[in-house]
Structures are given as C-alpha cells and as structure tokens.
Amino acid sequence: MRVLVVDDNPNSLKSLEVVIADLGHSPAAVAGGQEAMAALRRERFPLVVTDIRMPGMDGLELLTAIKTDPACSTCDVVLITGHGDMETAIEALRKGAYDYLNKPINARELAAVIERAAEHQALLRENQALKAPVEQHVAAATTSLRQDLDQARKLLRKHAGLDGVVAAAPRMLQLFDETRLFHANPDVPVLLEGETGVGKEVLARAIHFGESGCDQPFIAINCAAIPTELFESELFGHDPGAYTGSAPRGALGKMELAGQGTLFLDEIAELPLTLQPKLLRVLEERTFYRVGGVKRRQFKARVVCAANQGLEQLVHAGRFRRDLFHRLKVGHLVIPPLRERPQDIEALARHFLQREAVKKRKAFRSLHPDTLALLQRCSWPGNVRELEHAIERAVLLCDDTVLRPEHLSFLASPATACTETTSLPPSSILHLPQALPEEGLDLEALTAHIVEQAVAKFHGNKSRAAAYLGISRFALHRRLQKEPGR
C-alpha cells in the first residue's frame, strides 16, 4: 500500500520511511503540509502519516484540507503527537483522523495502525465495488420512473383537455405564465374574462393542473344551465329532508366534491343574486353550510370563475354584487379574442389539423399557404372553438395531404375573406312564411342559424344575444347545447 509520510524533521522522516518500507509497504516522504497536498493531487495515497507540529500548514490543517478535498477525502490520516498534545489528538479524531501515535513511535504500534488502515481501505474498495452496480441499477430505474411519470403527466394533461394548449402570441404566453403563479397559490380566487370560445376553461384547467399535474378533482358548474331554485342545493349540497323532494340521505354539493381541488364556476354572471353573498362569505371564511344543515363545513378548494367581458358593467347595473366582483378579481386574467392574436391562428390550426387527422385516420399533414392566409383573414366570432370546429369539419369531409382553401369553402368565399357574417334582414324573416320552399323547411336548422348569428353579432356575449332574441339566458343556453359540436 502506498503511504505518504509528512514531517518537517529530516531524521524522523527518514526513520518512518525505513520502518514502513520494512513492513512491506511503499512509502513516499515530504517535508510539509503544502508538499503533501501537492503529492496527493498527483497520486492516490490510501494512508497519510503526518506529524502534528509543523511550520506553515500543520497536521490539523492538513487533515482538514484532505477531508474537504473530494479527490482524496477517502484517504486515512494518522497523526503523530507529542506527550503534551493529547487534546490536539482528540480534536483530530473528531475531525476525521483515522488514528494517532505518540512520540517516540513504537514500531509495533505503527505496524498495527498501518495494518488496520490497509484493512479499512480494502473494505472501502469492496464497498465501492458493491455500490457501483446498485447505483447503476438505481439510476436506470430512476430514469425509467421519470419517463413513466412524464408519460403519466402527458396522459393526465390529455385527459384534462390540456393537450391542446397551444400559444404563440406574447399575451397568451404571458397568461400561461400567470396560470403557473395561480396554481401555486390555491387560496387566491381567479376571474377569467373573455368572449365565448377563447379558451377560458382551458386556462382554468391549466391553473388547476399546473405543469406537474394534480390528483384532486376539477369540478365545473355552468351557472347558466342550472335553474335558480336548484342552484343553492347544487352548490352547497343538502341534508336529509331539507326540502320537499330532496334526497332522503341528503346529497353532497359541488363545493364538497371539489375537495382540495378546483371549483370552476363558468358563466359566473348568471349566478343568482340571492346566492352571491353566500359565495362571498365562503370565499372570506372558507366555510359553508349545506341546505337545511347546522354543521359548519370546511371549504378547501380553489375557486376559478369565468365570464364574458362585461362583468363590471353588470356591477354598475346592479345585477352583480360589487364586493363579490372585487373579491373574485384578486386573480384576474383577460383572454383576448382570437382576432387580436393572429400569431395563434397558425399554431392552433396546425395542432387541430394534426390531431383530427390522427383521430379520423386522414392523410392531412400540412396547411397550404393560401389556407393559412384565408384563416388569418377570418374574424372568428366564435374564437378558438370556431376554428377548431372548422378544421374538424374540413378533415371530416375531405382527405388530402395538404389542407387547401377549397376544403374550407363552407367558411366564406375568398372575396368576403370571412370578414362579413351572413345574416337575414329583419324583413326577410318577417315575410319568410310567404315564400316557403317546396321541398320543405328545416325549422331547427333555421332557428340554430338565427341563434348562432345573434351570438356572433354580440361577439359571444350571451346575455346581450338573449335580450336581442327576446328569450331568457337559460333558454339561449339550451338552444346552443342542441347545436352539433357544442
């Protein structure tokens, strides 16, 4: 075994070198701590035998330097002390010295210490040899687990509807950065505003799932789809016998079902005024009561709400509580319509084309430049949802390797460039019964067309569209649900 001997006394250094050589080991001698460190960097020495008292770097300083240097930290260090250096020897053991020898050195004691150090070094080498394959196996298993985890996260994002999260516009990239911040702060309520079809629920799910996924529930409620008289029970749940016709055993509300996940309130503008102060109290106190119940229950979920732009106007009109509006606006994201972020049109169209081609087993692979120009000229009153359905329809009806303008002829003629929406003048609608077609009339299709045009006329604002058509917001929602693809 190679042994490095360190001593500033030439006679002691020579004596130690001779004794160690006689014991069958291979010594190397240096006269100080700095020289010892230089030798250790050049060559590996399993054992260092050093005097404590030396000028410059003494034995304790050399011990510290050896143990803190990764290149030689496994080296055993034996210190040689005088009779008055017992406290220093104990301190050296605490700092990691293997052993110490008193002066004058006894050859038998030196031989015994070197023998034990040799056995210790042999054990270290054996341990390292055994650890190496284990570490390799652990590293391989860890890599495999990480790959499985990444695959699971991708499947989770696909199941959550986040595989279609595509953005290229700077504002949308900024919004997705902000969703990560809200994901990390579940106590902060978030209000998402934007026209119909811009992707409010997609952002809500991004807030819930984040980048690493979330195993808690995502519970969505469309406030426009629930009758007012059932809303409180739907949201808070009810105890047995709370009201006539209630479930005999009671029922959990969406707040309890959300657990520690996310409660997503879509179309929050349609939340009944009578329930708005109760929701505000839940957000403030994080507790609630079931309908007919007396037990206070904890609410631990995050709240994300969505509304068409114009919620503040409802506040001014007295149709939405100002205090609830400002409480929901702690986290506030305004999603721009697709017509204001043309950079996203190409990215979204390519994504939808690839997805639908795989799903429907079609040959489509790319967009023709003229097709992209056509898509970018469109105003897209239905925003991302309308673009998605347009690509889906084109892939369904046609098959080619390149999506061409003629595959999207149902959108509009190139002359209009999709900037004008087709509409029937009021006089045509009023006099329609006088010129009914002989082959028959699809009343549902005509009604759906009128409803769709009304929603587009007000850029997705369903409240204004319902008022324009002279029907309730709930009735409009039911009509829209009947349309294919919704």
Image (cartoon, grey):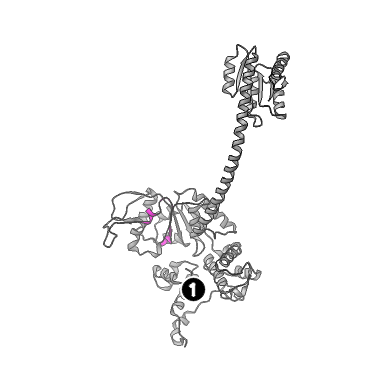
Residue depicted at x 59% and y 76%: 413
Characterize the local packing of mark 1: few (<14), some (14-19) or many (20 or more) Cα atoms within 10 angstroms: some
- Expressed as whole percent of the image width and height from the top left, the position of residue 226 reads 37, 64
Q: Nearer the viewer, residue 414 or 156?
A: 156
Which type of secondary structure does the marked residue at label 1 adopt?
helix
256 falls in the magenta region: yes
Left or right? Give the position of 291 relative to 341: left
Quadrant in the picture for residue 229: bottom left
- Expressed as whole percent of the image width and height from the top left, the position of residue 270 reads 40, 62
Res. 213 visible in picture: yes
121 falls in the magenta region: no
Residue 232 vs 432, above or below: the answer is: above
- Expressed as whole percent of the image width and height from the top left, the position of residue 329 reads 46, 54
Q: Nearer the viewer, residue 398 or 411?
A: 398
Q: Which residue is mark 1?
A: 453
- Expressed as whole percent of the image width and height from the top left, the position of residue 325 reads 42, 55
Quadrant in the picture for residue 111: top right
Magenta part of the chain: 251-269
Quadrant in the picture for residue 279: bottom left
How many numbered discs, if any? Answer: 1
Residue depicted at x 52% and y 56%: 155
Q: Which amino acid, by three-letter code, is at mark 1?
A: Gln
